[in-house]
Amino acid sequence: MSEEIAIRVSHLDKVYKLYNKPMDRLRESLGLAGKKKLSKDHYALRDVSFEVKKGETVGIIGTNGSGKSTILKIITGVLSPTAGELQIQGRISALLELGAGFNQEFTGIENIYLNGTMIGFSKAEIDAKLQDILDFADIGDFVYQKTKTYSSGMFVRLAFAVAINIDPEILIVDEALSVGDVFFQNKCYHKFEEFKAQGKTILFVSHDLSSIAKYCDRVVLLEHGKKLGEGGTKEMIDMYKKVLVHQLDDSAMEIAAKNDSEGESAGPSNALDAGKKKGLWKESMTLNPSADIYGSGLAEIVDFCIVDNSGRITNTIIKGDNFTVRMKVRFFDHVSEPIVAVSYKNRLGVEITGTNTMFEKISTGEPGRGDELTVSFSQKMSLQGGEYLISFGCTGYRDGEFTVYHRMYDILNIQVISSKDTTGYYDMDSETEVIRSQFTVKE
């Protein structure tokens, strides 16, 4: 293997046997099944290949069940592959799960030494690193308590502190940074920057596409255990957005088919659905099954979607891009100047922003029974990276009384992907100028 390569994964398979009932597993293991097959094969990974160069930060993304965590566990030696080859150059430190490798009956200090020894450090080396680990974890006297008393946040602080401070050549992280307060997360990402500057290799799995976009040099996209694509962050995030709503287009299918013909798996056919099915817009969106929906019945919001700047229906928008929120409202009686609205909340339920046809001074006229209005709100995405909830409404005044014709609270989510966030809820999109000058220092 070339000296420039830190990790090489070649045609890896991971197969699990699935049984309808536990007794079938016992019968098969004892050879009592005869010629009858009592299990079926489930491929957690199928023919996956990629390389990670030394000094790269590579992200792995994909839907739940795509094989992301499985590939990391094979790379770190937690699991053995069913087939294929794995080559690694460099000492690995991994953070796969909260407190993975911790003994619940040991104190934090004892687990530091346990984990350090498992990685390959001597007691003297761990002694030298101990204060840095304690300072980074910052959990106070809890480090002397048994880890079974820790909260999940304390677990990940200590686990990450151990993983990041033992000077690995390769750091592998699986979703761990979503736990802990914003200050600890900031500390972790600052350490990422230090590692990148030092030429360390990082393999990073996350559902946080903003972090993927900000920190990764390249991205590998998995779907149903197969590699769907590999390339630049923007290209792969765009492909992932299509996978989420089953709208991967023909060009992406050609790329995947080309990968497959070269021995690199392209993913199952159902994941490559071009999304050309005709129907409602909302059928291509990820919806909230617990949304609060009510109204008088005089009108109904029958369809809606989010459209990105390339005209694609999606729940994911890149910060700085233009996008459109579109609604179709059907009326069952005559109403005058109905007000059609859209609003955005953060995950804590705080309403961040919103608008409606009245605020925008747009007349909606006098729709009658059987009429439909299609309303589009187009704007630039200035919200910070993260996930938000969108609500729709159609209201108005009937017989002098304010009336909710139809309202859909938190009906869908929108994920904003950002490589740069500022303070607060939205970006002021400032143009920043720095002028350098000199002054004379008196002796």
Image (cartoon, helix red, strand yellow):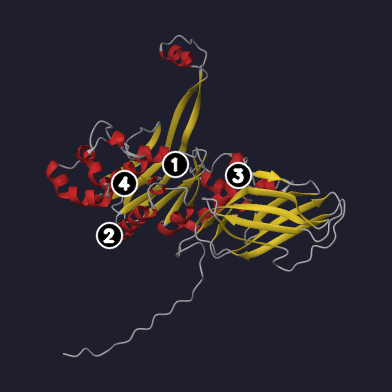
The percent coordinates of residue 227 (x first, y second) are 49, 44
Q: Nearer the viewer, mark 2 or mark 3?
A: 2
Q: Nearer the viewer, mark 4 or mark 1?
A: 4
Amino acid bearing label 2: Gln
Amino acid bearing label 3: Leu
Q: Residue at 43% of width from left, 35% of height from top?
A: 13
2 and 4 marks in contact (CB < 8 Å): no
Residue wearing tag 1 = 68
- Mark yes or no: residue 167 visible: no
Q: Is residue 151 left or right of residue 109?
A: right
Residue wearing tag 2 = 198
Q: Nearer the viewer, mark 1 or mark 3?
A: 1
4 and 3 marks in contact (CB < 8 Å): no
Q: Quadrant of residue 100?
A: top left
Q: Is residue 394 left or right of residue 32?
A: right
Residue wearing tag 4 = 157
Q: Quadrant of residue 153?
A: top left
Give the tally of numbered discs: 4
Amino acid bearing label 1: Lys
Helix, strand or loop under label 4: helix
Q: Label 3 neighbourhood size at 10 Å, few (<14), some (14-19), many (20+)?
A: many
1 and 3 marks in contact (CB < 8 Å): no
Q: Spot the residue most to the left.
A: 124
The percent coordinates of residue 415 (x first, y second) are 54, 53
User: Compared to 250, does 322 lie above or below?
Assistant: below
